[in-house]
Image (cartoon, grey):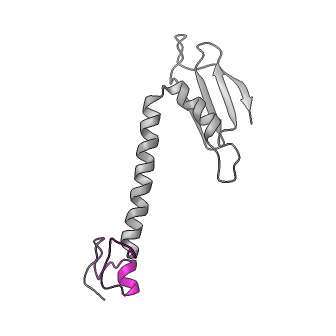
Amino acid sequence: MKDGCCCGATKSNPCICMKKGITKCSSKAPKCPCYAEKDKKSGKKESFEKAWNVVKELDDTEYIMQSWINDTNQDGSPQWTTRYKCVDCGAVAIANDGGFIDSDEFCADGEEDHDWEVVETQ
């Protein structure tokens, strides 16, 4: 087994390359498992950064409505199951069994809490 790897692994904490007995790492095809994993992680990071830049350009209400329309579970069912609107200030929110996202933390009517009304379920 080699002493170290391109990913920073050591004999005391070996990586997949070291465990498989790969003695020479390669960033070009055919890539070693460590470089292949680095590429996979890099692609995920780039996808996240692109998505985050889109989110930053939307205001909270637009972001929530886009999430309501576009976010799905792995089986294709809608991620968000209930859409709300505050009857006092018009803020919007979406929710599911695991969470709740609202466009404004505090109600603009001067009260702290929103008076949520269900607008739609799916």
Rendering coords of residue 96 (x, y %)? 65, 40
Rendering coords of residue 31 (x, y %)? 38, 74
* Residue pictured at 74% horizontal, 33% vertical: 121
Rendering coords of residue 56 (x, y %)? 43, 32
**Quarter of the rendering containing residue 87:** top right
* Residue pictured at 50% horizontal, 27% vertical: 60
Residue 31 appears left or right of 69: left
Rendering coords of residue 36 (x, y %)? 41, 69
**Measured along the vertical axis of the image, is residue 13 above or below residue 106?**
below
Front-lying residue, 66 or 30: 30
**Quarter of the rendering containing residue 69:** top right
Residue interval drawn in magenta = 7-31
* Residue pictured at 67% horizontal, 29% vertical: 83
Front-lying residue, 30 or 59: 30
Front-lying residue, 98 or 11: 11
Q: Is residue 76 magenta?
A: no
**Measured along the vertical axis of the image, is residue 32 above or below residue 51?**
below
Residue that protrudes farthest toward the front in the picture: 29
Residue 84 appears left or right of 22: right
Residue 16 appears left or right of 23: right
Q: Is residue 11 magenta?
A: yes
* Residue pictured at 68% horizontal, 42% vertical: 78
Quarter of the rendering occupied by the N terminus: bottom left
Residue 85 appears left or right of 120: left
Q: Main secondary structure of the magenta part?
A: loop
Front-lying residue, 2 or 10: 2
**Measured along the vertical axis of the image, is residue 109 above or below residue 29?**
above
**Measured along the vertical axis of the image, is residue 1 above or below residue 69?**
below
**Quarter of the rendering containing residue 119:** top right
